[in-house]
Amino acid sequence: MSGKCDALVEIRDLRVDFGTPARPLPAVDGIDLSIGAGEIVALVGESGSGKSVTALALMGLVDVPARVAAQRIAFAGRDLLQMRAAERRALAGRGIAMIFQDPHASLDPCYTVGNQLDEALRFHGNAQERASKTVRRERSLALLGEVEIADAAARLRSYPHQLSGGMAQRVMIAIALAGRPRLLIADEPTTALDVTVQAQVLALLMRVRDERAMAILLITHDLAVVAETADRAVVMYAGQVMETGTVPALFDAPRHPYTRALLDASPGHGAARERLRTIPGVVPGAAHRPPGCLLAPRCAFAAERCTAERPAMRRIAGQASVRCHFALTAE
Amino acid sequence: MNAGPPLLEARELARHYRFPGGPLKRRDAVRALDGVSFTLREGRTLAVVGESGCGKSTLARQVTMIETPTSGTLLLDGRDVAHADAALRRKLRPQVQMVFQNPYASLNPRRTVGALLEEPLVIQRRGSAAQRREAALAMLARVGLRPEHYARYPHMFSGGQRQRIAVARALMLNPRLVVADEPIAALDVSTQAQVLNLLADLQQQLRVAYLFIAHDLQVVRLIADDVMVMYLGKAVEQGPADAIFGDPRHPYTQALLASTPSLARRRANARAIPRGEAASLTAALAGCAFRSRCPRAIARCAVEAPPVVTIGAVRVACIRASEPA
């Protein structure tokens, strides 16, 4: 997946502010993000790091009172910020689809699976699908087959409450695929599922990516999920990107102390019954960001410079960048 | 390994729920917990692992004496909890305390941390007001909080700090057993580690035993002495943690381990993921409940209930457990 310079998504200097203009509360504080065609990019971070808000800003779904500003938010080579709302919806509404953590909250309990697939195809299908209900039904059956739902014809008549969690998330994926998106944003898609079902859904997402050459922006807090599924990871902390890199490299030799600390704090890194290394303190809220490096108060390596001066993002090698005055070197 | 007398002992413990009467009257009950046996010794940790609907929270409700088991025995310090009268239960309950998954829901937002910590002592009529205050302040220090936190309200704390408060509250009565139901599942990675380490430290200092309910095997590996893997109300495999993780014998345990995402595994490795999801608990199945999802199922699995086989220190409920994998 690497080596492609034609980015499908290119975000430069995105800011999302909550609060008032006089007292802005930055949820996203100047992040760059690019996603190549067919690439799986993981946005990783703890609660409040700004990963979901970043995705919503890309979708154009951040509501007032929050303010979105960016140098550029481009999808398929065109700047979404320069477009009128209808034009943006036609391009990004069809080209980008999104699934969420709790599929039962995303599906409408009053309508059958068939109704909801039909609706997605009526808006985002191709010309034939929009014109004919019969074509839409055929396509609905094919989509359910694609997400490995057995007995698709019967499932079209099911209501969401009749589906298990894993089945409901498969239906959400089928609906998301209706418009043949080039990017699927998956916001914690398996967090609410049991482990065996999580493994099934992740395998499904990877298979669909391979077959359709569709890119996936995977938002998650689970580093192990990233290690197993993503091509590249973007580590966020308190609204900023701390480190990006390809997945094997980032996990084998993290350059940012935060990435390193997150890995050390993850169960499953060390041996059984071993004490975990912890990160002291908590993620600072938007109103309490330190002036220097955002991590400085919690960083084991922090020096004087870190509390005074906020480090800039630096490219270190190939696709790897890090925001740290004293980036760790590979051991 | 088996030092000390058993603190908690369950034999063929079962809890079935009946459907209420009415037009949808059905004869069969939900067999949420269906004949589970285990022993937990003082100062040790037994992890109960399984997916939704496996009965782990039902087990917690029996052990904490919130409910009465349908059948089987449950002994705390050799005394029968299941058939205890009200007076004995009142005496036993302070010895078993609970920590819940979501510290945003388990702490009363209208009470200060001090009041929350002292409440168990007030209910049990222990100490004077001054003594209770002193005990609460000492417990705050033990869980890594400061004296000034005493007068604050839960909303002023982060998730990890709230879980510390919940742990502190559970320990106020000096229980011998704490039932922790997914205590770190709602926390961020960096705070998960803090709370896990805290639980380990407290166990060392206080010799408290944990019945640790979790779905995350990576977490269980860090904290458990013994593991019991449950599926649809039954224990499918149980034994020392090292044995279960090192050489899992039941296909469901193997499936759980294969499905758990790991930092060490790269995606190139294909893995054996079980198909489907757990079936309903109402259908009284003949044979093995896991067979429809099991990669090793044979015809006999549909007919015979799997016998419990002992292999070394591990007990496995699988017809094929003693065959080479």
Image: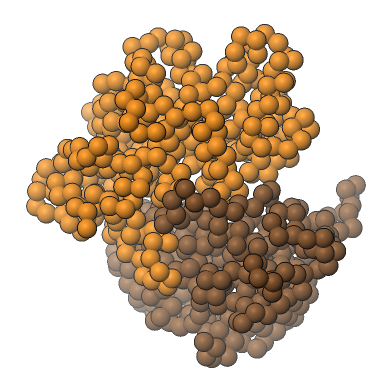
Chain colours: A orange, B brown
Closest to the observer: A206 or A298? A206
Q: Looking at the rendering, which quadrant does residue A134 occupy?
A: top right
Query: Which residue is found at the position 22% from the left and 40% from the top?
Result: A317
Against B262, residue B75 (above or below) is below
**x and y, in percent, of residue A212 in the image:** 53, 27
Closest to the observer: A69 or A140? A140
Q: Please state if B162 lies on the left or on the right of A115 as rendered.
A: left
Against A127, residue B289 (above or below) is below
**x and y, in percent, of residue B289 in the image:** 76, 60
Closest to the observer: B65 or A140? A140
Against B265, residue A163 (above or below) is above
Query: Which residue is found at the position 55% from the left and 84% from the top?
Result: B41
Closest to the observer: B293 or A105? B293
Res A247 visible: yes
Q: Looking at the rendering, which quadrant does residue A72 occupy?
A: top left
Q: Please identify the quadrant where the C terminus of chain B is shown.
A: bottom right
Q: Which residue extends farthest front?
A: B324
Q: Please state if A136 lies on the left or on the right of A76 as rendered.
A: right
Query: Which residue is found at the position 39% from the left and 61% from the top?
Result: A269
**x and y, in percent, of residue A185 in the image:** 47, 32
**x and y, in percent, of residue A181 in the image:** 51, 23
Q: Which residue extends farthest bottom?
A: B4
